[in-house]
Amino acid sequence: MKNGMQKIKYQRIIDFFRASFKKTPSKANGTSLSYGKHDYLVKISFIVTCGSIAALSVQKECVIAQLIGGFFITCLLMFILYRDIMRYKPAYIKKFNMLLLLGLMFVSTLLIGRLFGYLLLNLSKGLELKALDSAFFGIPVPAGAMLVSLLFDFHTAITFSFIVSLLTGLWLNDAAFTIYAFVGSITAAFGVIRCKKRSSLLKGGVYVIAANFSAVIILLLFKGELFTAKALPSIMFAVLGGIGVTAIVSLLLPLLEYSFKVTTDISLLELLDLDQPIMKNLMVTAPGTYHHSVIVGNLVESAAEAVGANPLLARVSAYYHDIGKIKMSDYFVENQSGSVSKHDKLTPHMSSMIIINHVKEGAELARQHKLPEPIIDIIKQHHGNMIVSYFYQKAKEQKEDTSPVEEDYKYPGPKPQTRVAALIMMADVVEASSRVLTDPTPARIASLVDRVINHIFLDGQLDECELTLKDIHEVKRRFSYVLTGIFHKRIDYPGFDFSDEGLYKEPAKTHKDKPSENKKAPKEGTPTAQAPQG
């Protein structure tokens, strides 16, 4: 009986820790993931390893009791960070490289802080400053928060700033420095929100300098040291710390982006450059597809802003989503200039295989040109598992012994997993369908958008992404607005006949025997044709 009670007690303890490490469903999708024993070991080892290194980095003396206490403190704070990520950003846990990157940044921020603390303290001694501890205001702790904001997101940067600031204050035995480090870190994270140029890092550094300057004055005023010899060197080191933050982030950001294959807005903006080899190839080989991709980019960027997705990722992904058509561009209708289609000589099944294959070809081209993984995923998902209806219906109409199998005419999938992928799917179909409108009035455009998106929704293509019904309604409204602007009306130009009869009418023959009449200037009051404007 006693052994049975002990087993139940131990099982409850095990269940408690297992529930602590289990994924909490996110607010966005409400779905849960299952993890194996290996994943649990990875999570536990992640916290223990980072906690051990962080505990060593905050020690002043090699005392066993302090080392054990520091280990438990850092593990507790790491556990808080881990639970926050599981609650609000569970996607990071699924990617081992992101988990490793976060741990590396956590540890390296503390180690770099110790290194700069040692160097700045010796600099103060060399300058023979009276207040040596003023050098600690130059430690670039906010660099870690700025990098987390750029490589992860602002929410993770807030939690990261809080934990690193606590550990820094613990290392220096100064609660005031905890406040100073937290203010600088939060400002650094704020300063690079929607940062799209590497030069914008300088602006973030200026914000950190201003925050450090203000915080150090307030803390000196609180301690009653504002009008002492400590004030001037403290302000000087605070400004120096802001400059150091900019230098460290500018140096490490490209290295971390490349090493861990992280996509930031800065790297996305570089992909918008039309001088990219793959974009040049698309423009020359498949001009119709290129123009289609640009229009899709306009549609998804407007819709992404409305539903809270990343508009820059949406536009870049739209530009590259059909690069697979480069291989066999003549088999796609937007690139066909003649009235004869190459599909006329092929069976419907063969034609559907060529159309479907552009997704696979696009993913391979994207990998060859080292495009970011989110863009490759969107290339795979932008058709979901939809059916190539035109060739499927054509196959059904042919009189054959066996009826066509529907699965043979479907894209391989998967369905869109993110909001951006779903937006590109809808914009792709809407833009292509809008080309068949004979009289594109605003009412007809809105009706077309509504029918196309409803068909995609009822087909179940949006089941695995995070779009809500409210988002879909807003997407319809944005698509209709942009397409109405594209298919705008124009007035007839005076003196020009753009009808079929006028365009193909033979020009009047000139008379060789009357050259003087051709050179005469028109009489006053005679209307002359003007070149079209706009």
Image (cartoon, rainbow, N blue to C red):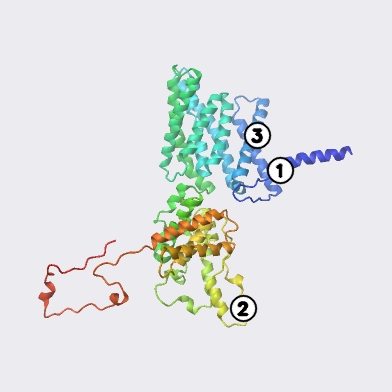
Residue 142 location (% of width, % of height): 50, 34
Q: Name the residue under label 1.
A: 19
**Outermost residue toward the right?**
1
Q: Nearer the viewer, residue 22 or 171?
A: 22
Q: What amino acid is labelled 2 in the image?
A: Ser
Examine the rendering and report whether any part of residue 278 can be seen. Answer: no
Dot 3 and dot 2 residues touching (CB under 8 Å): no
Q: Is mark 1 on a helix, strand or loop?
A: helix
Q: Which quarter of the rendered picture does the C terminus lie within?
A: bottom left
Mark closer to the chain start, 1 or 3: 1
Vertical arrangement, residue 132 with respect to residue 441, above or below: above
Q: Which residue is drawn at 46% across and 22% down?
A: 124
249 sits to left or right of 37 = left
Q: Is mark 2 on a helix, strand or loop?
A: loop
- CA distance for labels 3 and 2: 64 Å
Residue 376 location (% of width, % of height): 52, 57
Mark closer to the chain start, 2 or 1: 1
Examine the rendering and report whether any part of residue 41 can be seen. Answer: yes
Q: Which residue is drawn at 60% across and 33% down?
A: 54
Closer mark to the observer between disc 1 and disc 3: 1
Q: Residues within 10 Å of mark 1 (few under 14, many from 20)?
A: few
Q: How crowded is mark 2: few (under 14 residues within 10 Å), some or many (20 or more)?
A: few
- CA distance for labels 2 and 1: 52 Å
Q: What amino acid is labelled 3 in the image?
A: Leu
Q: What label sits on residue 76 in the rendered view? A: 3
- CA distance for labels 1 and 3: 16 Å
Dot 1 and dot 3 residues touching (CB under 8 Å): no
Please state the total of marks drawn on the protein image: 3
Q: What amino acid is labelled 1 in the image?
A: Ala
- Residue 503 figure quarter: bottom left
Q: Name the residue under label 2.
A: 403
